Amino acid sequence: MTRKAHVLASVLALTVSMTALAACSSNSKDNGASPSGSQSPAGSASAGAGSSGAKDTITALLPPVSSGFQDRFEQLSKDFNAQYPNLTLKIEPASWEDMTQKLDTQVNAGSPPDIAFIGSEGISKYVQQGMMMDITDSVTPEMTDDYDKTPLEYMKNGTGLYGFPAYMEVHAIGGNKQFLEEAGIDWKKVQKDGWTFDEFREAIKKGVVKEGNETKRYGFVFATAGVTSKDYLNILIKNAGMPASFTTDLKYAYTSKNFLEVLKDVRVMIDDGSMPKELSSIDAGKRWNMFLTGQTMITGKGLATFENSANKNNAKIDANDGSAVKGSIKVDYIVLPVPTFLGQEPKSSTVVDGYVTFRGKKEPTAEHKANVVKAAYFLASGQVAATTNNDLFAAHISKSGRKAAESMTVNRNPDNVAAVQTLLSHATPARPDIPAELGAKAIKIEDEVIIPKLQALLANEIKPEEMYEAVKAAAVKAFGADGVVTD
Amino acid sequence: MALYRKHIGRRSTRRIRNAAIIVILLLFAAATLFPIYFMIISSFGDPVEAAAMSYSLWPGKISFASYQFFFDYSTYSLRWIGNSALVAGSVMITNVAFASLAGYAFSRIRFKGRSILFSLLLCAMMIPYQVTQVPLYILIVNTFHIQNTYGALILPGVVTVYNIFLAKQFMSTIPNEILECAKVEGCNQLQIYLRIVLPLSKTVLAVMAILTFMDSWNTFFWPFLVTNTMDMQTIQVGLKNFRFANTTYFAPMMAGATVSALPMFILFFSLQKYFLEGVTVGAVKG
Amino acid sequence: MTTPTMQTAQQAKTGRKRRIRGDGVWGYAFIAVALLVYAMFTAYPVVSAFFISFQHYKPLGSTFTGFDNYAATFRDPLFWKSIRNTLLYTVLTVPVALVLSFCVAILILPLKRRLQTTFKAIYYLPVVASGVALSVVWLWIFDPMPAGIFNRFIAVVGAHNQNWLGSSATAMFSLVIMAWLSSHGASIIIYLAALLGVDESYYEAAELDGATFLQKLWHIVIPFLKPTTLFLLVTGVIGSFQVFQNAFLMTGGGPDNATTMVGLLIFNNAFKYFEYGKAAAQSLILAVIIAGISLFQFKFLGKDVEY
């Protein structure tokens, strides 16, 4: 018995010493560069006032925003350090899909990076967790004045400002110039004046090329596999009088009759044979392949940068060195607006991504906050923003970015540039007035009801009416009968 | 091997039997190997973006450009493999050592609380890791402050319940008489473990080593969470960096996957030899 | 029976009494490291998750909500659907995997050693390759268009083009096929290792009695492999209940939640919706279900197995 106790005691002792060791290391670590927001009191006390104060490290979690972006990280850190010698910018790379998971784990654990690059629609979710850092009192007027008003609004939630926007892009669709002309579609007119769903439906019918029973070319292919189905529906319903999930008086919008009409149209395009019946499992890579190999006339979603990809592939075909996409043809990429439904105003689905700021478990010191703001602004303006946005063919949204971009040249089709400008002119405005709690509920309905049902609708397993009823039931359950639109 | 009749009549009958078996095994192998085959032939493609997907079942040409591309992609490509090898190697050694000790204790040594402790261990297997992830992350990062170190990568995997369970199940099949004999002859438990149990368990330990190494080698999520610089990443985390927003460098990714699988094959073949010989000493006669 | 420990026989007589009592100490010493690691990196997070399951979790101060998370889970139809999906997946994959691995191991057994090694290696290959890379290949195989590999294959047989992962009717089946055609490597080598451990004398005795192949299989091999089968069954079922990666990478749970497994649901709750408390509650419910099934397996199959 005594020996047993002995062993147990030594195990216990070991555990205790391990814990003590851990505690030791945590102390020593805190005095060094703290990973996130949690400035050690000693550090800030010795700091004193002034911008050239104590040393500080700012961490940033960044995805490959543009193809050359991650290669420039080392240079970015160096440039930032040259500008602010007391500050170190530590950049952590992650791919797009991993980035959210990592960020979410870090947020859950209460230790996110200082800065992360995310879509503005994600802000409300993190605000609700209480982990975003409101930088309203730390930004200088020069910083806020640098940005266009619309994109900056997207970085707000309620009254707080949570970072700086990097770019504002519109979700459009993209056409093959040659095929459009063969089908007799006046794409220049469409770029200027837009089109209604009925016009669009006729157009994509004409785009279909058949060989016997087999479709050689579809009129329209949109990536809808998995989560991309969300983009598809969102783009369409914005043009059907539902620019956001809530109306201006904060009623849930997708219970409107218009929503049902859009769902019916989604089905109609497949039943017409203009879209493949396997649409529900076509992913982003697949449909881009179909576009480049001439298997579809129009594809979606379309971002400005796709013109760049198409041009690159054309150059490879010209070079004839076998590096072009197998079976691909030369394509002139044409930016096209999304059709409008039921006589509604066109409203472009707008994506604003940016550098958002997080806090740790401890309240951040004013000084650390100011440093984080400096880093976020550094990334989201001037030379850095100009280079990145040019990579993406995205419009510049800050004065400093435009200025820096003046000396850079981009090879773009002027018609497309004009078309994007038109689309941007009716960009959907930001809705910082939607409370984080309502926003989170709407996201949950989207994930748990809308997306699964849409997948079933695309696979022809349920009727549009069934999906509409399911969404309505979930909405009434979440927001009450008074909290939803009835028309 | 005497499950099969040793003297199955004529030689030719045995040959036919074996040939039939081989054909069946090959068919099953073809089905299971298809994705791997696809991975390897795709890796010989040109390093173009994924839009260039083709479903040719035969490589049009063999080019190592994608391998080149993979190693050129990051200066850390080789270091990722090194990191993976270090982490997986450490985890493999600690698991074999500690899981076999614990497995032996749980199966063959009577001590108070044995079954309760073992059930406790088993319970842990039943909790989905998705949920322990966050507390574990908090422990490693916020309490121990060892993120981005080898410690963070290795410590949580030092010994897994699965391996203890595996060792215990195997060691419970060791005939009792052998152990009793040793006891009567005055061996203490450590001696029994080292001189009798370990040699008899070579097979399971080799299996455990391979499985553990492979598991650790292929783990993505945990190393991804606790590393934050390129030089500390493992090969799986590095591989994922190939994937971009809308396009994927498919052939280089497959080249990377092939490269990452290669050390496993080497380990597998070398260990395979070892444990086959170890075990067949007594069992095989002809 | 000669053992290498003869020399200690002398000391044995004098130390005998203490040794019998001392066994327990050895036991504790042997499990010490395992227990320590377990306590720190497994038990602590589990206990932590247990407390979180009674909270509305937020990184900056959670609120205690009692059994709300559990109640909400039991009311959630999606939770029950995911349990159903998981059960279906388990029933379709685990037994088939066991039978397949067992048959393959038996078939490999009579071959020459070099061939054995080769086949083991071949079957092990799919386990070795990175799951992420292979899932991309599987996406190709299940390409819904007529050019897709599986679709071309079934077209030869004269079947219609299938929207494999995109339709509720075939999505789950596609994941099951994927499981059937991969990941047997480990079970095969574990079985084979166990088969090689069967003592020769059993077969010899049986042969003297004129036992046939099937009789030997039934009376010697299957009983002898019972601990192994039990191990593979229990860990297989546990693994299957926690399955997450395939659904996550291949279908994202769709279409219409036809492939949403409990593991994926928990992941979504924890990370996508930040309902970490609910995720913790669901995982504990899942743990109880798994524990119940495992216990049943032990009781039902493990009657004569010492564990």
Image: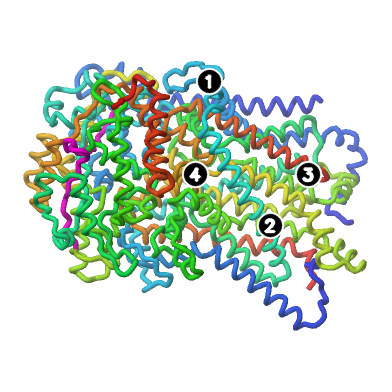
Please state which amino acid type lies under the numbered disc 4: Ala
Q: CA distance from mark 4 to mark 1?
A: 27 Å
Q: In the image, which is nearer the foreground, mark 4 or mark 1?
A: 4
Q: Tell me which numbered mark, 4 or 1, is placed earlier along the sequence.
A: 1
Q: Is residue B259 above or below residue A472?
A: below
Going by the numbered disc 3, the residue's amino acid type is Gly
Q: Looking at the image, is mark 4 or mark 2 earlier in the sequence?
A: 2
Q: Determine whether the residue tagged by mark 3 lies in a helix, strand or loop.
A: loop
Which circle's residue, 4 or 3, is located before the other in the chain?
4
Name which quarter of the figure residue C31 lies in: top right
The reply to whether the C-beta atoms of the residues labelled 3 and 1 are less than 8 Å apart is no
Residue at horizontal 59%, vertical 70%?
Answer: B27
* Helix, strand or loop under label 1: helix
* Element type at mark 2: helix
Asked if residue A340 lies in the magenta stretch, the reply is yes
> Can you tell which mark lies on residue C99?
2
Residue labelled with disc 4 = C258
**Whole-percent x and y of residue B106?**
75, 39
Residue A37 visible, this orientation:
no
Quick one: A155 or A54, which is closer to the camera?
A155
Q: Is residue A230 visible?
A: yes
Q: Which residues are magenta?
A: A331-359
- Of badges 3 and 1, nearer the viewer stands 1
Distance (Cα) linking label 2 and label 1 = 42 Å
Residue flagged by tag 2: what amino acid is it?
Val
